[in-house]
Image (cartoon, helix red, strand yellow):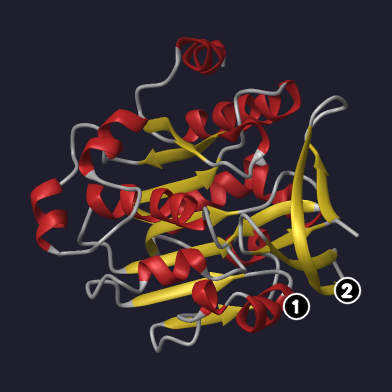
């Protein structure tokens, strides 16, 4: 009998992946957690039936959520990751010797512990001595922080359930206050393609643009996410990701990547006209 995982992207579009077996199924205090092993994408994690990360294409997401900011300012030393329970974002950050401390705040400890068991290729660096794990609400954690971080990465789910508060104006304002003068905020910015995702994209951009002097959006190709066309937000009080990157310094670090490179960095900020038009509207 063939076994398939199906995720509904819209009322008329679904993603179907043939699976070898279901590795885990359970419910935490916050959501339903599943791990599968598949023929095409290897092992993957879903939350409430939504694809979060797969072994085959995770490098694209994690390269782009981390290295764009780090190439813009390779001197970043203190980092806050909100979400990212699979550990992939922290894994990429720990490759930088210049980073002295990483706080990772994940509301659902079960996601972290199960990822360590079923996705060790992503979660293997969560025990790095520079990493401190907090299992609490990220919106509460960042409140009251003042110029504490050079980089905040919001590696969140969609704005439903546990991830809803990570798209609020109050949360973005707290992130602004928690960043140093050269601080950078990178956030999961949804997709521009399907209407529901595009509306969330515009809402987030409007809120961030009101706070930050520099607020830009960049794109990447993510095969297992709805439409395959996905975005991150880049916001900073002073650093522009197009004019200020230190590519020579970053290249000299010798960090090997599979998706990111300086050319992709620059090109990812050149958006399709329909996307730029939506952003300009807000």
**With respect to residue 77, does 167 lie above or below?**
above
In front: label 2 or label 1: 2
Where residue 26 is drawn, which disc sits there?
2
Quadrant position of residue 141: bottom right
How many other residues sit within 10 Å of disc 1, few (<14), some (14-19) or many (≥20)? some
How many other residues sit within 10 Å of disc 2, few (<14), some (14-19) or many (≥20)? few
Quadrant position of residue 200: top right
Q: Earlier in the sequence, mark 2 or mark 1?
A: 2
Residue found at x 68% / y 82%: 113
Q: Where is residue 159 in the image (x, y as percent from the top left)?
A: 73, 44
Secondary structure under tag 1 reads: helix
Q: In this view, does 74 lie to the left or right of 65?
A: left
Specify whether residue 28 is in view.
Answer: no
Question: For the C terminus, which image quadrant?
Answer: top right
Between 126 and 61, the one lying in front of the other is 61
Residue found at x 43% / y 71%: 91
Q: Is residue 119 left or right of residue 65?
A: right
Secondary structure under tag 2 reads: strand
Between 14 and 106, the one lying in front of the other is 14
Where residue 175 is drawn, which disc sits there?
none
Residue found at x 74% / y 72%: 108
Q: Where is residue 251 in the image (x, y as percent from the top left)?
A: 13, 55
Find out whether the residues at labels 2 and 1 contact each other: C-beta distance under 8 Å: yes
Report, in whole angstroms, how far the alpha carbon at label 2 lies from the one at label 1: 10 Å
**With respect to residue 105, does 204 lie above or below?**
above
Q: Where is residue 77 in the image (x, y as percent from the top left)?
A: 28, 69
Residue found at x 64% / y 41%: 225
Residue corresponding to mark 1? 110
Specify whether residue 24 is in view.
Answer: yes
**With respect to residue 55, does 12 lie above or below?**
above
């Amino acid at each position: 009998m063939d076994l398939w995982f199906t995720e509904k992207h819209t009322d008329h579009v679904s993603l179907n992946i043939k699976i070898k077996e279901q590795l885990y199924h359970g419910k935490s205090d916050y959501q339903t957690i599943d791990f599968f092993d598949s023929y095409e994408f290897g092992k993957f994690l879903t939350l409430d039936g939504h694809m979060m990360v797969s072994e085959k294409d995770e490098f694209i997401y994690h390269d782009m959520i981390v290295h764009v900011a780090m190439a813009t300012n390779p001197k970043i030393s203190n980092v806050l990751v909100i979400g990212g329970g699979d550990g992939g974002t922290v894994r990429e950050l720990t490759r930088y010797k210049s980073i002295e401390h990483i706080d990772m705040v994940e509301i659902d400890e079960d996601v972290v512990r199960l990822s360590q068991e079923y996705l060790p290729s992503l979660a293997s660096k969560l025990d790095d001595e520079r990493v401190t794990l907090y299992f609490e609400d990220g919106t509460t954690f960042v409140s009251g922080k003042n110029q504490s971080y050079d980089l905040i990465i919001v590696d969140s789910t969609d704005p439903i359930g546990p991830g809803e508060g990570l798209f609020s104006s109050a949360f973005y304002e707290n992130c602004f206050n928690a960043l140093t003068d050269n601080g950078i905020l990178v956030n999961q910015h949804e997709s521009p393609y399907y209407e529901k995702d595009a509306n969330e994209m515009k809402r987030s951009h409007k809120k961030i643009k009101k706070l930050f002097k520099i607020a830009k959006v960049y794109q990447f190709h993510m095969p297992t996410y709805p439409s395959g066309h996905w975005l991150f937000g880049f916001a900073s009080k002073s650093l522009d990701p197009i004019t200020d990157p230190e590519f020579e310094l970053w290249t000299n670090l010798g960090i090997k990547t599979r998706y990111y490179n300086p050319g992709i960095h620059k090109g990812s900020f050149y958006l399709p006209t329909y996307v730029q038009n939506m952003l300009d509207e807000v």
